[in-house]
Image: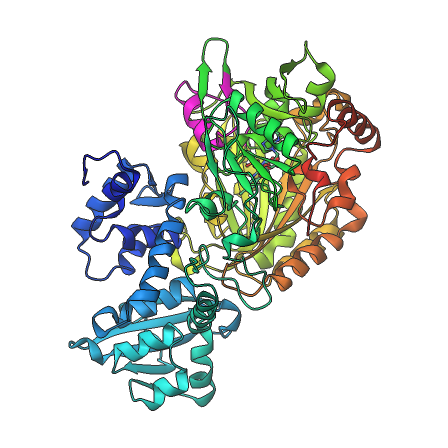
């Protein structure tokens, strides 16, 4: 990697970015390419050796994380927070090029256009619901090259080899520049055909449909118009483009009034205002459907920074929100027009193995805490996706693989340091500030800003027996009934959940299962292997992925199915039982999912959770045996997720007679009216009184009270 030997931030940043192919590689990773081959596919001409070298450099610069694939063959590449922070830099570069550089034949590699179409701009909703094969002939590339677009189950894949099916359409690209100009929205499809640069042969209806599968022309053309209206403003939106009907983030920085927001007395962290190139990166949260534009983001590095930011927020009358890991689906971590007290840079972890205790700052993610504690063969109950923040998850209760054996995350919370609404610091525990400590354990926030969590640890792993067993969705009614019997007698060493979905196109699954509707039972045994046998041997599973794997591997097993930046809508409910009627309704709704990425998961609770006195923590729904979590998912460039939202709502509504409240951390933007059901009436009354006592001026509002759909 280049080092310019200059202190200047532009020179330091250039050391990483200004290397040949690096921006292209980063773009591909930020667009969601996770494997070596996927990254290489969007960079034809780049040698595999140089790609490997650049990926190593990016890893060393902590811009990407590299970890082994779950099947042990090869690696997965994911952007770190620093990597995601480069997205606005790349889009600014793109905007500059759009303004100052024409697209010329030497820029117009047709296979890259096809890759971009498929990777970033594919209109899944317009793809036919049957297999279609489109053969592309690139006669313009000098040598005769071919690629196949294979459409199946509303997914599309580019193959460089003949997939072996009849070709429904043949598209010949005689002039790559015409193809690129169409993709960029510079010419109409009809004009491209008339020019002779593109030729299509096949049935009339498919010939007509083909160009509508690409959102690129429309999105690029619209962005160009926006940019012309607002000269000088970066125009490409993060990770795909919003579409007609979707709230388009205003790029006009001056729309956010500057006020006196560029400095905070005694604050030593980083302040990010709307005119900062990092602004879009740091205001983005996990759920890409959230587009909140705060006036100021105070990236804290210490408790003192938190206090300084809080004082400033109060004295300037700004609305305040608190950000931990930014995973709250409702996006309450980031407020519109106010001050975000961003704790994500606070990442110190100390592990004291002898007593089995870990202390972590609020910016820590579960993957980071697990890695630190597993170094000593220890762990505490934490979220099942490694990029979730410890903060919000802990304050809401904390469901995880270890909960049936060791209780919820809050049951392992020994103390929390808190900056209170009046800017003081205190430590709450079973001994001190006991009422506040009760509320911090499951109240969902809104009682102060937690700046440190101390957890009890347990011996776990380093390897555990865990993984998923898959059956066809058609067999889900029988599998779920068998599952109900299995969990009824399972000891607390067994944790499990069932997911109904189309199997992800994941490298850990055989290709023939990709996108197939399945019923997947995820299992963990902390005791003997035979504990899982009754479920693993039920019927004839399609696949059994249960094996000994590192506990940290288990904790990141689901990561790739819920990446940052996709758009999500959640509807969840506790279930008092798993009746036959509920099972049938679940399977029926699962089969009608409107997106290949949407899913429903049933989580089995009980065990140690139910053994703890419900009055001892604000998480009081301890006798609820199941939590049902329905996740409607759509991609950033797809139309606003009306069908996915309706699907998730209808799914949960269909089980109404079995509802048992809602888990506060699964509440989405339109769940405000369900808040009391997250606690039960007595706990809700106590929590409301506590909030009034510790924050009479309503400086903070708990996530449950800030839903903003
Ligand atoms: C992919 C994914 C997987 C998940 N898996 C699980 C799971 O396995 N188990 C589970 O129980 N939940 C899970 N959740 C839900 C999760 O618990 C919540 O989204 C939680 O809010 C995440 O915490 P965070 O710090 O990342 O969130 P943030 O969005 O940063 O915060 C959420 C809310 O908590 C408040 N808050 C955050 N930190 C603090 C603090 N230090 N002091 C005071 N208030 C604070 C914020 O103001 C905000 O309103 C998952 C969520 C996602 C998106």
* Residue 364 part of the magenta-drawn span: yes
Q: Is residue 566 visible?
A: no
**Which residue is more in the foreground, 245 or 475?**
245
Q: Is residue 125 left or right of residue 368?
A: right
Residue located 43% across and 60% down the image? 236
**Which quadrant would the N terminus be assigned to in this image?**
top left
Tell me where residue 666 appears, x and y as whole percent: 65, 42
Q: Is residue 151 visible?
A: yes
x%, y% of residue 428? 65, 15
Horizontal placement of 539 versus 120: left or right? Answer: right
Towards the viewer: 431 or 620: 431
The residue depicted at 25 percent of the width and 50 percent of the height is 22
Q: In this picture, is 129 found above or below 170?
A: above
Q: Position of residue 372 (x, y in %)?
A: 42, 23
Q: Position of residue 470 (x, y in %)?
A: 51, 50
Q: Is residue 97 left or right of residue 639?
A: left
Q: Is residue 671 magenta?
A: no
Q: Which range of residues does the magenta coloring cover?
A: 358-382
Q: Nearer the viewer, residue 696 or 318?
A: 318
Q: Is residue 512 above or below residue 5?
A: below
Q: Nearer the viewer, residue 590 or 49?
A: 49
Q: Quadrant of residue 7?
A: top left
């Amino acid at each position: 990697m280049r080092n310019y030997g200059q202190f200047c931030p532009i020179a330091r940043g250039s050391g990483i970015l200004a290397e040949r192919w690096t921006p292209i590689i980063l773009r591909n990773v930020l667009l969601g390419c996770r494997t070596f081959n996927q990254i290489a596919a969007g960079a034809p001409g780049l040698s595999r050796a140089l790609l490997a070298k650049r990926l190593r450099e990016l890893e060393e610069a902590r811009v990407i994380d590299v970890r082994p694939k779950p099947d042990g063959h090869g690696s997965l590449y994911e952007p770190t927070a620093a990597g995601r922070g480069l997205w606005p830099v790349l889009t600014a570069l793109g905007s500059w090029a759009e303004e100052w550089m024409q697209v010329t034949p030497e820029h117009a590699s047709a296979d890259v256009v096809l890759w971009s179409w498929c990777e970033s701009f594919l209109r899944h909703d317009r793809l036919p619901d049957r297999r279609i094969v489109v053969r592309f002939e690139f006669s313009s590339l000098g040598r005769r090259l071919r690629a196949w677009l294979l459409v199946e189950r509303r997914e599309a894949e580019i193959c460089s080899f003949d997939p072996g099916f009849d070709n429904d359409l043949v598209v010949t690209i005689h002039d790559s520049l015409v193809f690129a100009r169409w993709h960029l929205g510079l010419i109409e499809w009809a004009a491209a055909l008339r020019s002779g640069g593109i030729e299509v042969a096949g049935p009339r209806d498919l010939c007509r449909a083909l160009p509508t599968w690409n959102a690129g022309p429309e999105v690029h053309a619209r962005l160009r118009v926006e940019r012309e209206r607002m000269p000088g403003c970066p125009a490409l939106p993060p990770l795909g483009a919003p579409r007609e009907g979707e709230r388009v983030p205003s790029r006009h920085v001056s729309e956010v009034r500057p006020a006196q927001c560029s400095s905070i007395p005694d604050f030593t962290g980083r302040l990010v205002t709307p005119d900062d190139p990092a602004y879009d990166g740091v205001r983005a949260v996990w759920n890409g459907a959230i587009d909140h534009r705060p006036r100021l983001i105070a990236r804290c590095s210490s408790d003192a920074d938190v206090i300084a930011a809080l004082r400033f927020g109060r004295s300037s009358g700004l609305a305040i929100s608190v950000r931990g890991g930014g995973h709250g689906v409702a996006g309450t971590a980031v407020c519109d027009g106010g001050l975000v007290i961003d704790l994500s840079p606070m990442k110190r972890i100390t592990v004291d193995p002898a007593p089995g205790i870990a202390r972590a700052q609020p910016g820590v993610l579960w993957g980071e805490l697990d890695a630190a504690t597993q170094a000593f063969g220890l762990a505490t109950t934490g979220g099942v996706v490694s990029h979730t923040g410890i903060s919000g998850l802990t304050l809401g209760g904390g469901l995880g693989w270890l909960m049936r054996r060791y209780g919820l995350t809050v049951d392992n919370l020994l103390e929390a340091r808190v900056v209170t609404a009046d800017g003081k610091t205190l430590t709450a525990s079973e001994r001190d500030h006991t009422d506040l400590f009760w509320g911090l354990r499951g109240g969902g926030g809104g009682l102060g800003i937690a700046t440190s969590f101390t957890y009890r640890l347990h011996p776990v792993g380093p390897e555990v027996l865990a993984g998923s067993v898959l059956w066809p969705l058609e067999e889900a009614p029988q599998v779920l009934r068998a599952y109900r019997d299995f969990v009824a007698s399972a000891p607390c060493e067994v944790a499990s959940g069932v997911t109904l979905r189309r199997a992800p196109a994941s490298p850990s699954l055989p290709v023939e299962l990709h996108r197939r509707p399945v019923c997947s039972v995820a299992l963990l045994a902390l005791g003997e292997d035979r504990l899982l046998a009754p479920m693993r041997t039920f019927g004839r599973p399609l696949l059994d992925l249960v094996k000994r794997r590192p506990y940290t591997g288990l904790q990141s097993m689901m990561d790739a199915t819920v990446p940052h930046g996709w758009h999500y809508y959640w509807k969840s409910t506790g279930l008092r039982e798993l009746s036959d009627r509920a099972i049938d309704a679940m399977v029926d709704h699962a089969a009608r999912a409107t997106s290949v990425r949407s899913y429903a998961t049933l989580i089995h609770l009980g065990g140690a959770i139910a053994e703890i006195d419900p009055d001892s923590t604000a998480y009081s729904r301890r006798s609820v045996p199941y939590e049902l979590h329905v996740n409607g998912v759509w991609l950033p460039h797809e139309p606003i997720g009306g069908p996915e939202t309706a699907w998730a709502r209808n799914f949960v509504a269909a089980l109404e007679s079995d509802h048992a409240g809602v888990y506060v951390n699964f509440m989405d933007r339109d769940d405000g009216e369900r808040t009391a059901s997250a606690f039960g009436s007595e706990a809700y009354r106590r929590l409301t009184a506590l909030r009034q006592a510790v924050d009479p001026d309503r400086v903070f509002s708990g996530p449950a009270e800030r839903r903003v759909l």
